Amino acid sequence: MNQENNHTDMDIQVTAKKDELSLKAKGAGLLILIAMCIVGIILLSLKMADMEKGTILFAPLLFLLYITYNLIATLDAVLGITVRYRDD
């Protein structure tokens, strides 16, 4: 059976101007911020496990979770990330 591929290849070129960042720089910055938030979540969770009354750290943990959620949404909006499953 011969199947036709209806895929189009496209090259995208990103340029940087003097007063704005390129798409790669924005994506890299957002990924670094997400990584820092995830490390903070892990460290706060470890500290909560060590403390006897670790419930005091729920507010900062929820704040970091909220920031991380918004950063992931921003990364999705800026870079236009889509996840598709193709069964070839």
Image: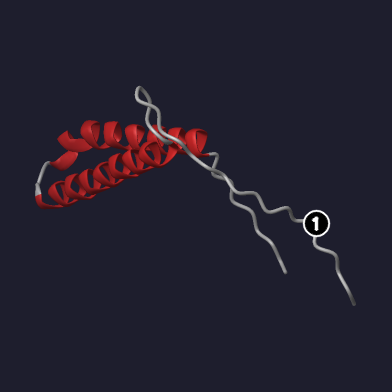
Number of marks in the rendered image: 1
Residue 51, image x and y in percent? 9, 47
Check disc 1 and give the amino acid type. Asn
Q: Nearer the viewer, residue 67 or 59?
A: 67
Q: Residue at x 18, y 44 (%)?
A: 44
Q: Quadrant of residue 28?
A: top left
Residue furthest to the bottom in view is 1
Q: Residue at x 16, y 46 (%)?
A: 48
Mark 1 surroundings within 10 Å by alpha-carbon count, few (fewer than 14), some (14 through 19), many (20 or more): few
Q: Residue at x 29, y 34 (%)?
A: 62
Which quadrant holds the C terminus?
bottom right
Residue 58, image x and y in percent? 23, 36
Q: Is residue 50 left or right of residue 72?
A: left
Q: Is residue 32 left or right of residue 47?
A: right
Q: Badge 1 is on which residue?
A: 6
Q: Is residue 61 placed above or below 83 in the rendered structure?
A: above
Q: Residue at x 21, y 48 (%)?
A: 45
Q: Quadrant of residue 66?
A: top left
Q: Nearer the viewer, residue 42 or 50?
A: 42
Q: Is residue 30 placed above or below 20 in the rendered structure?
A: below
Q: Is residue 66 left or right of residue 80?
A: left
Residue 49, image x and y in percent? 16, 52
Which quadrant holds the N terminus?
bottom right
